[in-house]
Image (cartoon, grey):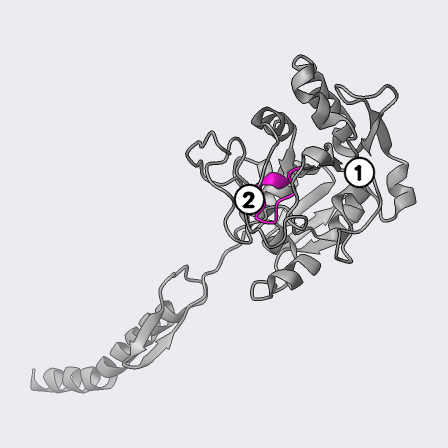
């Protein structure tokens, strides 16, 4: 019996600590495994933090990209990093524009910048916040890819639409891509009843015009046939009122809601206001991308 007891004692001294160490190694390997889906840092020792990256087979796609894909049938696919058009052209979501000045962000935005400010459809409750200009930043190469890289390409797709009132023979030319001409025709058709009320607003309406934005080298949305200006005599524009620093608007809410119902945003909801300007930007009117509802203010 004494011989057996001694043998067991020797055996436990050889194997016990080693077995314990192996158990500790397995625990450490489990905690530090990059395959673990952990959201919090793992603290191994005082003062030392090791962050374990989550492992995702399907990274989260930005909401803005989802809105763009639903708005434009030309988008073939989206992922966490950008979108790809049917043509094969690739556009990156985030190119590090977050910390640029407003001027630089307008001159060279990425898709994230373009979608960074939400739009509020309907009657808006307060004047726009400082520098809140949803839709004013455009990735020009994206719109060139959709509507035409040069004026000759855009012109091939233009259609003429007759305003609800105005001089005989007046036509507004817009792109037929994404059925913009049909959308504008429906808007005009719905505004024919109160002719006297809107007659002056639509006299002198303008659509396609290949040009740059005033005071910049950026192409205007009019260059792609996706924008329309109503009569400038009844429009207000921030550059004209420079120094006044007061929001102005004379466009009836009925006009605004009619355009928004067909996917057009209104420049009257920009801090740098352009109340005569309407622009087809359905991605900003997607329910997932619009601003929260604000209280009505009949004065606006």
Where does residue 167 sit, x and y in percent of width and height?
Answer: 83, 21
Position of 281 with respect to 152 (left or right) is left
Look at the image and give the residue range highlighted in magenta.
267-275
Determine which residue is flagged by label 2.
247
Q: Which is more foreground, mark 2 or mark 1?
A: 2
Alpha-carbon span between mark 2 and mark 1: 27 Å
Position of 156 with respect to 284 (left or right) is right
Query: Count of labels shown?
Result: 2
Name the mark on residue 291.
none
- As drawn, the residue found furthest toward the front would be 244
Determine which residue is flagged by label 1.
225
Q: Along the line of sight, which residue is nearer the eye, 114 or 242?
A: 242
| Label 1 CA crowd tier, 10 Å (few <14, some 14–19, many 20+) | many
- Reading the chain from its start, which is encountered first: label 2 or label 1? 1
Q: Is residue 269 magenta?
A: yes
Q: Residue 208 is drawn in which quadrant? A: top right
Where does residue 44 sit, x and y in percent of width and height?
Answer: 31, 76
Tell me if I can see residue 264 in this picture: yes
What residue is drawn where x is 54% and y is 34%?
121
**Residue 166, placed above or below residue 72:** above
């Amino acid at each position: 019996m004494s011989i057996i007891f001694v043998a067991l004692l020797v055996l436990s001294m050889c194997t016990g600590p080693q077995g314990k160490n192996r158990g500790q190694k397995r625990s450490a390997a489990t905690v530090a495994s990059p395959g673990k889906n952990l959201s919090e840092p793992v603290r191994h020792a005082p003062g030392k933090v090791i962050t374990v990256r989550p492992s995702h087979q399907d990274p989260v796609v930005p909401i803005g990209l989802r809105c763009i894909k639903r708005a434009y049938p030309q988008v073939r696919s989206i992922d966490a990093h950008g979108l790809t058009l049917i043509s094969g052209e690739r556009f990156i979501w985030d190119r590090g524009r977050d910390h640029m000045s407003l001027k630089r962000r307008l001159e060279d935005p990425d898709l994230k910048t373009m979608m960074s400010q939400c739009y509020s459809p309907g009657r808006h409750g307060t004047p726009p916040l400082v520098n809140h200009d949803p839709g004013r930043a455009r990735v020009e190469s994206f719109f060139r890819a959709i509507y035409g890289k040069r004026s000759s390409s855009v012109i091939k797709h233009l259609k003429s639409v007759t305003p609800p009132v105005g001089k005989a023979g007046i036509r507004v030319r817009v792109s037929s891509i994404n059925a913009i001409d049909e959308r504008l025709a429906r808007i005009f058709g719905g505004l024919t009843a109160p002719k006297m009320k809107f007659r002056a607003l639509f006299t002198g309406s303008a659509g396609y015009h290949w040009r740059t934005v005033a005071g910049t080298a950026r192409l205007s949305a009019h260059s792609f046939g996706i924008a329309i200006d109503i009569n400038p005599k009844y429009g207000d524009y921030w550059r004209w009122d420079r120094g006044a620093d007061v929001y102005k608007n004379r466009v009836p809410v009925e006009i605004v809601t009619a355009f928004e119902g067909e996917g057009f945003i209104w420049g009257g909801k920009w801090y740098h206001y352009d109340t005569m300007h309407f622009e087809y930007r359905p991605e900003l009117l997607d329910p997932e991308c619009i601003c929260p509802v604000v209280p009505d203010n009949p004065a606006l």
